[in-house]
Image (cartoon, grey):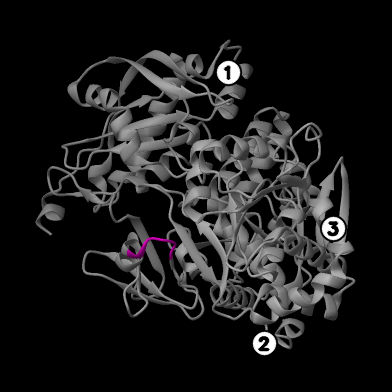
Amino acid sequence: MAQTQSGAEGMHSLPALLNRNAAQFGDAPAYREKEFGIWQCWTWAETATEIRAMALGFLELGVEKGDHIAVIGRNRPAHYWSMVAAQMVGAVPVPLYQDSVAEEMAYVLEHCGAKYVVCGDQEQVDKVIEIQQDLHQVKHILYTDKRGMRKYDHSQMNALSDIMAEGRAGHHRLDAELDRRIAEITYDDTCVMLYTSGTTGKPKGVVLSNRNVIESAKNSAEFDHLTRNEDILSYLPMAWVGDFIFSVGQAYWCGFCVNCPESADTMMTDLREIGPTYFFAPPRVFETQLTNVMIRMEDASPIKQRMFRYFMDHAKKVGGRILDGHSVGFMDRLKYAIGNVLVYGPLKDTLGYGRFRVGYTAGEAIGPEIFDFYRSLGINLKQLYGQTEATVFITVQPDGEVRADTVGVPAPDVELKIAENGEIFYRSPGVFVEYFKNPESTASTKDPEGWVATGDAGFIEESSGHLRIIDRAKDVGKMADGSMFAPKYVENKLKFYPDILEAVLFGNGRDRCVAFINIDLTAVGNWAERNNIAYASYQELAGHPRVLETIRSHVEEVNKSVAADEMLSGCQVHRFVVLHKELDPDDGEITRTRKVRRKFVEDKYADIIAALYDGSETVSTTTEVTYEDGRKGSISATLQIVDVPVVPVSHQKVAAE
């Protein structure tokens, strides 16, 4: 970090960090993008030139200080550049989820009052044009990909590259104004506005300052000893705070290289080609990779299967201990080294983690078995706990203190406290400025002393100082007998199984728990093919008797595990149903970051929940769905309700407490 710390004085904006990077290591790679199967590269010096041309183009368009510029599209260098160029001219970048439907997009664009929109391609342009018929506020649409755009009305539309060309051509007129605006940027000016996923209502615009972003990037980079030699793969939604801090904040603070995959479909291939040293992924990515590994092993030869199981059993025993630097006997180390040559090393290369130095998962709790699997391979995967309102970092796991059941200790400069009701509060340099146009929510979330209510329940271990998350505070309740109801605890155990994609537990205030389950079509479909089971749709496979029996066995195993926890043993699943469709963000059932909208799901499927509790053996239901082209339709199904044995427990002690 020596090279970044030396330039820390006065680095109070992303444009300032960009200029420092271009001056100090201008020949080092800053961005790579794979297009048409070829990796293209831009150095920091070239990046600074491109971003300045874009900023001059924005001035040519008439962008004023304080304007909001929306950015909609996949991870591309030009889209990241547009956010920094917006800051150069005093505007506020507002990245949106590219898979948002027009209605969701309309809310955000209207709420922030975006006058300019940078779109990735024709699809995003079409959405904005559809919205613009009602909003009439967008002055100009810019697009990155020219394909399909030739016959559009360009009176209020232009290719981003053409705007950059205009900026270069007019730089003699515009340079002084751009330099003046850059010089006026302060540490407390807005750096970016990111919208929450809207789990419980309309998304809120979280205003983050330069101070929030740069202090968080600096502290987290120093914590994990990040340098400008890191390589990261930027594939997560640009509208998500995690991507912004990793791909923009930390990238500009450290000066490392941001690699953009060609598409979501090629992400895993591109991951293997880049071999990132620093990586972030939500649990779903790691779960999917593990599912694919297990599917491939099912198809491997008996010899390979035996070798894999033999060395993985040994890795589970000593791999994590070796990674954490603990004492391990010579023979165990030798066997692990042999396993690394035969199994662990090739597997890490296949996953794209051959150069992996440090990585994080967050957003949802990861199953401990999944977490331990990666660490047993020698992959330094850690958990962090964060929020958009915290500019990501609340707690992090120090090397050597990594555990599956905690989310670590307070991040640098972060203070924690636990309220009497168990809710977690924090205070840090990353605490957001405000919710845009929402002073009531700002006041209810952040008190005058800067303490922020997370909405999560947890406790700090006295012995280690680590934070343990129980659940969302609003989701933690009590069963009818007084025992604790914490749905995420059980749902995460269920999602450990490769066949289970999603689970939603119900039972607050009731005498027993029931669950909805989504199967993982990839894993279960592969199983069906190997067993010559024909199916025509997700719905048909989800209702297959053998699939239901397999899921029942998983739920029974989870019940045994839950019963061992005295505090949460009342959360065992008595009955479940495998839903006839996947929970989908287009249907409002989950957010774009794949968090379940629990109340929405409970209301939408009230008939199924009622059947789970009234003793019915089947339930017939009709559900509205949204197709990819935005059309609405409905699907009907008769679902089998499955009973599951539970382990008898006594709640007298828990209820009394």
Work out how far the residue at label 3 is from the one at label 2, CA to CA, in angstroms.
31 Å
Q: Disc 2 versus disc 1: distance between alpha carbons?
A: 61 Å
Amino acid residing under circle 3:
Glu
2 and 1 marks in contact (CB < 8 Å): no
Q: Of the residues shown, which amino acid type is indicated by label 1?
A: Ala
Q: Nearer the viewer, mark 3 or mark 1?
A: 3
Q: Is residue 268 above or below residue 111?
A: above
Please state if 220 lies on the left or on the right of 639 as rendered: right
Q: Earlier in the sequence, mark 2 or mark 1?
A: 2
Dot label at residue 166 = 3
Circle 3 or circle 2, nearest the eye:
3
As drawn, the label of residue 528 is: 1
Does the segment drawn in magenta span residue 438?
Answer: yes
Q: Choose top left, top right, bottom left or bottom right for residue 442.
A: bottom left
Q: Amino acid at mark 2?
A: Gly
Which residue is the site of mark 2? Answer: 10
